[in-house]
Amino acid sequence: MASLTLSVLDLAPVGSGTTAAQAFQNTLDLARRVERLGYRRYWLAEHHNMPGIASSAPEILIGQVARETSTIRVGSGGIMLPNHTPLHIAEAFRTLEALFPGRIDLGIGRAAGTDARTALALGRIPGARGGEDLPGQLADLFAFGGAGFPEGHSFRSVAAVPSDVPLPPVWLLGSSDYGARLAGELGLGFAFAHHINPYGTLEAMQIYRDAFTPSRHLDAPRTILTVSVICAETALRAEELASSLDLAWLRLYSGQPGPLPSPAEARTYPYTPQERMHVENNRTRLILGEPAGVWDQLCALAGRAGTDEVMVTTMVHDHGARVRSYELLAQQQ
């Protein structure tokens, strides 16, 4: 079998008929289990105003997951920089690094992680210091993280406390060539969201490697590929589990997000021909099936992308089935 490092991206899914509180307990349970299975990282996403996703405050979840585990690296996948001030992020992640030294990752994204109206509620000002100013925001983050501001800068006397703790390793997240190029130019690790943009993966990874400039962060390129996966004992069972995600995607894109539906709900949903076409198109984001077939597809994709680490996100209604998907995948290593 091909060598491949596995990690986890968790959105803390909330299934219909369950609660966010249960979703958080499921996150802690999954983290403990995948650590025992040998997964390298456990990252928490940031999304807002989505009833089916409970991970709106990843820095809080990171602390809880790190407390429940002992060896797996825990981080953000990602923290959306335009939603927060660089000072706040530097302080939050220095605090996490102080509590769990050597185990924290800081994955940074430039999207809102939500809709435009909610982004405004989060404090984003259109045209001012938004995702288009990511380089400037990153520069401020690194300055607060230890690099310091130049003489005469208005923030030169502002310290990110705790000030005697380093900023954790920073990864730039992206689903386009913009993030790939910026990560390379800054000499940062790069995580590409194949589960968001399956068509841009190979080009973005090559752009990153071509643009990479050694830095104080890294002396060589480092990449992660994030992939949506559903693994089950049989292909039929995997299809049944995936039906929940099919309907969830459809509702999200029609402006009606809700809890992750059950396979029973998906089975009885009256899809129109146009909706079925939309579902089929979304399936290009997903790798599903029996363990050996899923593993072969992941290894082939990772090989084409030139990475040796795949971060798996699995969105299914039943927590037990979700855990089992990660178990079956780990058994293929």
Image (cartoon, rainbow, N blue to C red):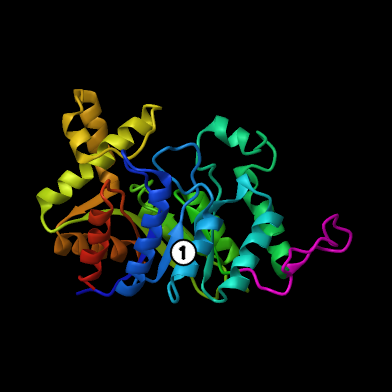
Label 1: element kind: helix
The location of residue 15, given as percent across then percent down, is: 32, 43
Is 201 on the left-hand or right-hand side of 86? left
Quadrant of the image containing the N terminus: bottom left
88 and 299: which one is in front?
88
Choose between 54 and 138: the one closer to the eye: 54
Residue where numbered disc 1 is placed: 65
**Which range of residues does the magenta coloring cover?**
147-167
Q: Main secondary structure of the magenta part?
A: loop
Task: Give residue 125's position: percent from left, percent from top.
Answer: 67, 35
The single residue placed furthest to the right in the displayed view is: 152
Q: Quadrant of residue 118?
A: top right
Q: Is residue 279 left or right of residue 195?
A: left
State the image quarter where residue 326 is shown.
bottom left
Q: Is residue 132 above or below residue 33?
A: above
Instruction: Residue at 34%, 31% (x, y): give it.
Output: 251
How far across and how far down the image is residue 130, in percent? 64, 42
Q: Is residue 42 magenta?
A: no
In this orientation, does residue 89 appear? yes
Q: What residue is drawn where x is 64% and y is 66%? A: 95
* Label 1 crowd bin: few (<14), some (14–19), many (20+), radius 10 Å: many
Mark 1 belongs to which amino acid? Val
Residue at image position (61%, 63%) is 93
Identify the image quadrant of the C terminus: bottom left
Q: Is residue 166 above or below residue 184?
A: below
| Residue 171 point in image, percent of width and height | 53, 62
Q: Is residue 211 visible?
A: no
Count of numbered circles in the view: 1
Q: Is residue 137 left or right of residue 274?
A: right
